[in-house]
Amino acid sequence: MKRMGSKRAGWGLGLLCMGLILGAQEPPPGPPPEGRAGQGLPPMPPPGGPVQEPTSFQATLTVASRKEVLKDWTGTAEQKDTSGILVADKGELVLRDSSLSTRGDSSSLEASSFFGLNAGVLVTTGGLAHIEHLDLLTEGTGANGIFVQGKGSKATVSRCRIRDLAQGGHAVMCTREGELEITSSGMITLGANSGAVATDRGGGRIRVTDCVVETRGTDSPAVYSTGDIELRGSRLNATGAEAAVIEGSNLIRLQDCDTTSSVMGKWGVMLYQSFSGDAEGSDGRFIARGGRLVYAGQGGPLFFVTNARGFIELQGVHLETKDGWLLKAAGSRWGRSGANGGHVVLTASRQKLQGRLTADGVSSLELSLKEGSMLQGSLNAEHTARQSVIRLDAGSRWEAVGESWLTSLDAESAARIEGKGTVHYRASASPSLGGRTLALKGGGQLLPY
């Protein structure tokens, strides 16, 4: 991750949301932690080398090699590197109608992010946790809320409230193939580098259903994936970072989610590879079906892809961007200059796209419109992209606005372009058009170059 009492009845989602907003404390005064929010990129990664796994974990309550059922339990942890609850060695915990608070800091943010040191609830070495109606508060630096690490370790979480106040305090997190399912819960983080729903080195699998997720800290996206994360019917809001970030060959899926980010000079969704060692591969996938995806800030696109191939699939999503910039693919400070472009494959089904899609000289755009989709806007208006291609099926169309430059175009797709704009196509790579100049329905032109 980049330095990136009983509560049982009546905890509906609306009440959880109100409780999160009213109950959260503001971040402490003083200058923000080091970050690069104003530059539109996550903070610099930690070294990519190995981080030593702690030889043991300390906790107020430890459930190991046995099953324990607790109700109306109240716990605290005051010391550094001390979790409230540890479930380990194939132990099993059933926890209901309880509360837990921790205040100690982590001695190592990397050990906290990779292995769960100092987490409120840590599930490891094949442990299982079933948690319902838990009010969880962590106040220490690096203190994650619920952390699951290691293959065979799993947590199911329902109707809980999770608040993380300090830097590096992720609400729910998995690493090293851990698994977590969370439903009908509320999560909020206030510190820097504190993505609420996150995986880190070694990946993991997280499923989120009917939850409220909010982040307020610098470089704290609502969702950060180095693994497999799916969210359904949830509300996500990030005010200090992107709504969603995918690093490496990993995945985020949204189904019927209401997703918003608003920090100036960034974007809504980012796909990248840092080569820090936290995520393998360079083929990130972002899939959204239904719901809303909004970037309410200025100075950045809704989607940004850099130093990676970004496979973006959209179906029936309501998209909003403040200044009409839909997508940017470009090199950045990540990777080797000249070989660190963004390469986008965007597939839209039953989808309306509106705005401009841009790419720099080391980047490419490949856009497919299917099943009655529509683009209203421009593609590669600056004529800088290494490659720029659009394909439209029989039921889809492109209403061209302004100037667009394509490196290739087939005749079937050309017949589905209209509007007042001018679309330039490379004649040598578009043999089916025969180098012709064609008039577009709506007053525009299709011109060879």
Image (tube, grey):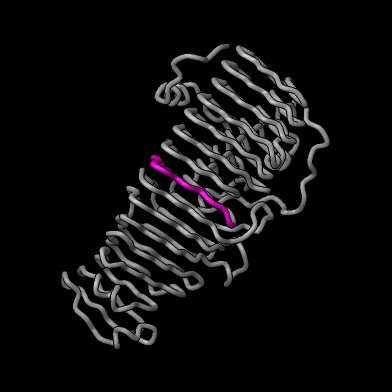
Say left or right for 91 vs 160.
right
Does 332 appear above or below 242?
A: below
- Coordinates of residue 372 in the picture (x, y in percent): 27, 59
Does 122 appear above or below 179?
A: above
Q: Residue at x 35, y 68 (%)?
A: 379
Q: Nearer the viewer, residue 153 or 49?
A: 153
Residue 323 colored magenta?
Answer: no
Q: Name the image quarter holding residue 60.
A: top right
Q: Residue at x 29, y 63 (%)?
A: 377
Q: Quadrant of the C terminus?
A: bottom left
- Coordinates of residue 199 in the picture (x, y in percent): 61, 44
- Coordinates of residue 427 in the picture (x, y in percent): 34, 85
Q: Residue furthest left?
A: 442
Does 25 appear above or below 175?
A: above
Say left or right for 40 vs 119.
left
Q: Residue at x 73, y 20 (%)?
A: 61
Residue 274 seen in render: yes
Q: Nearer the viewer, residue 393 or 218?
A: 393
Start-end of magenta stretch: 249-262
Q: Name the image quarter holding residue 328.
A: bottom left
Residue 258 colored magenta?
Answer: yes
Q: Nearer the viewer, residue 218 or 433?
A: 433
Number of disc labels: 0
Say left or right for 129 vs 410.
right
Say left or right for 152 vs 289.
right
Residue 266 seen in render: no
Q: What predominant SS class does the magenta segment belong to?
A: strand
Q: Nearer the viewer, residue 424 or 67?
A: 67
- Coordinates of residue 225 in the picture (x, y in percent): 57, 47
Q: Residue at x 41, y 72 (%)?
A: 388
